[in-house]
Structures are given as C-alpha cells and as structure tokens.
C-alpha cells in the first residue's frame, strides 16, 4: 500500500485589509489561491510517497508602493508582509529546513533587478518562494536534516 504523507504550513499577513494575492502550487497543480488574503490559513495537502521530485511554490502578487510606509530617511516604518510558518512533513517540524532550502525570487516589487534570495519566513515583495524535495519523503528528510 502506497503512503500519502501530509505536508502543512500556515500563511498569515501583517495587514488583512491589504489586497495581496497568494497562490500555492505543488509542481504545476494549484492547491490554494486567493486574490485578497484576509485571514490566517493552514494549508494542508498529501503527496505520493513513491520516487518523485516535487516543488512547493508559493506565489505572492498584488503588493504595491502603497503597502509600505517609509519615514523621511527612507526607513520602512510599516509594511505589508506575508508570513509563512509551521512547516511540517508528516508531523516532523521542517521550519529550519524549509528556510535553508527555499529560494525566494523577487524584484523588490519592480524597483530593482530580479534576485534569488534565501527565505526567512517573511515575504515582503511580490515573488515566488520555491522549495524542492523528493520522495520517499523519510529518505529525503534523513538526507537533508
């Protein structure tokens, strides 16, 4: 009998009135999408545990200059961000591993060239957070933890 491990994580925002869109994909399948992220949400899904490659992709869009307040010296004093936390693979906390292995691709909301950055749990720009892993999941965890 084939196993179907569960993966879950939480999404939240610093401002539930801001019209920020979030979409979550596993490979090319959209498993969650909202055009206006309004409340904290736990995302949960199952995967096949046979020999496969996966990409968990979280896409953020809709953020603009009005969502960030700066002081007279250009320091950010208020910002709308998307918070991603509590990453779990079949009951195993993988927050640290998710941050180490994820790539956050963004262009500072169109103000600079596109970069690939490490992800630290908070997305302050439109962009894509990508986390690649493979199955069997427990073997991948043993090799990467």
Image: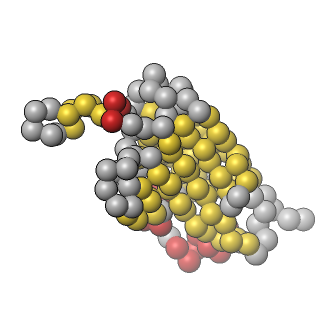
Q: Quadrant of the N terminus?
A: bottom right
* Residue drawn at 75 percent across, 58 percent down: 47
* Residue drawn at 15 percent across, 40 percent down: 74
Q: Residue furthest top?
A: 17
Residue 13, given in percent of the width and then of the height, sits at: 45, 33
Residue 58, given in percent of the width and then of the height, sits at: 56, 51
* Residue drawn at 45 percent across, 22 percent down: 17
Res. 28 visible in picture: yes
Count of marks placed on residues = 0
2, above or below 71, in the image: below
Query: How is the structure coloured here?
Result: secondary structure
Residue 85, given in percent of the width and then of the height, sits at: 48, 45
Q: Nearer the viewer, residue 2 or 30?
A: 30
Residue 7, given in percent of the width and then of the height, sits at: 65, 52
Q: Nearer the viewer, residue 92 or 24?
A: 24
Q: Nearer the viewer, residue 115 or 83?
A: 115
Res. 40 visible in picture: no
Q: Residue furthest right?
A: 1
Q: Residue furthest left?
A: 73
Give the left or right position of residue 97, taking residue 30 as reference. Answer: left
* Residue drawn at 54 percent across, 49 percent down: 59
């Amino acid at each position: 009998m084939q196993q179907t491990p569960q993966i879950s994580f939480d999404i939240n925002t610093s401002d539930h009135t801001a019209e920020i869109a979030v979409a979550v994909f596993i490979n090319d399948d959209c498993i969650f999408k909202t055009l206006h992220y309004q409340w904290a949400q736990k995302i949960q899904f199952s995967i096949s545990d046979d020999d496969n490659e996966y990409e968990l992709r979280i896409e953020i869009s809709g953020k603009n200059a009005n969502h960030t307040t700066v002081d007279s010296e250009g320091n950010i004093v208020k910002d709308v961000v998307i918070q991603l936390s509590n990453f779990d693979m079949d009951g195993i906390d993988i927050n640290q591993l998710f941050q180490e292995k994820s790539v956050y691709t963004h262009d500072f909301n169109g103000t600079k060239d596109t970069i690939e950055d490490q992800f630290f749990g908070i997305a302050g720009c439109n962009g894509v957070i990508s986390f690649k892993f493979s199955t069997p999941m427990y073997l991948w965890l043993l090799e990467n933890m």
